[in-house]
Amino acid sequence: MDFHRVAWLCTFFCFAQVWSLPTRNCILRKDLMKKTCTFIETASGLFPSQCLDDHVSISFPQNVFESSNTLQVTGVEKAVYQTLQNIDALFENYSVPDQWDEEKMTDFRGIVYRQIEESKCIMSKSETEENFPSREASLKVYFEALSSTLKEKDFSFCAWEIVRSEILRTLNFILKHNSDIMYGSPQL
């Protein structure tokens, strides 16, 4: 009988220890976000001069990634997560130009997907200030504008360059203004 109690207690403490370990999920990782920027930036060169006439003005929703206090951090985290999902959807639904480095784009998409998977539970966090719906609406308008640009310009090389430069601007803004809500690479 004592053996069963000891075995049960050992099992209980083992599970208690495992459940108390910090999870690597539910975080935004700065190192992965930097890699994402690097891959999308180097998949092609500088913005092509032949595309300058095609460049359109797309309103960047800067306010989506800003918070005025710590009560809004979850809303910003959710906005970053939603941005990654929207980026993934853009590249999943349409094929990119042949002129882009295929290996870098594969790596880019893989890291975007990894970030989405690793931070999925961000969307189930509750907010003290419920401001995510307005952030989500602004993101929807922004990514619809990117998608419309691709369609209106018949998915041309220049249309994709416009989208690439916008995504790079978005990711760089997130890194520059929200690095405090992201974590470095996990210590294993």
Image (spheres, rainbow, N blue to C red):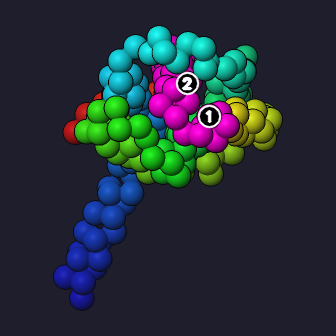
Residue nearest the observer in this picture, 82 or 72: 82
Q: Amino acid at mark 2?
A: Ile
Q: Quadrant of residue 111?
A: top left
Decide if residue 147 is in sight here: no
**SS class, disc 2:** helix
Q: Which mark is drawn over residue 162?
A: 2
**Among the 4 quarters of the image, the one containing residue 6:** bottom left
**Tag 1: residue type?**
Lys
Cα distance between the residues tagged 1 and 2: 10 Å
Look at mark 1 in the image and give the residue it sits on. 153
Taking the image as shown, residue 24 lies to the left or right of residue 94, namely: left
Q: Position of residue 3 (x, y in %)?
A: 19, 82
> Between 69 and 80, which is closer to the camera in this rendering?
80
Q: Secondary structure at mark 1?
A: loop
Identify which residue is drawn at 51% across, 26% down.
Answer: 158
Look at the image and tell me in which quarter the C terminus lies. top left
The question of residue 166 being in magenta is answered with yes
Q: Is residue 20 visible?
A: yes
Is there a contact, CB below 8 Å, between mark 1 and mark 2? yes
Q: Position of residue 104 (x, y in %)?
A: 29, 34
Identify the residue at the far bottom of this view: 1
Indicate left or right for 68 with 83 as reference: right
Tell me where the magenta segment starts and ends, as one range: 149-178
Residue 51 within the segment the image draws in magenta: no
Q: Position of residue 172 (x, y in %)?
A: 49, 18
Residue 177 falls in image quadrant: top right
Query: Measuring 47% from the left and 11% from the top, which residue is drawn there?
Result: 49
Quick one: quadrant of the N terminus?
bottom left
Query: Camera-side residue: 183 or 104?
Result: 104
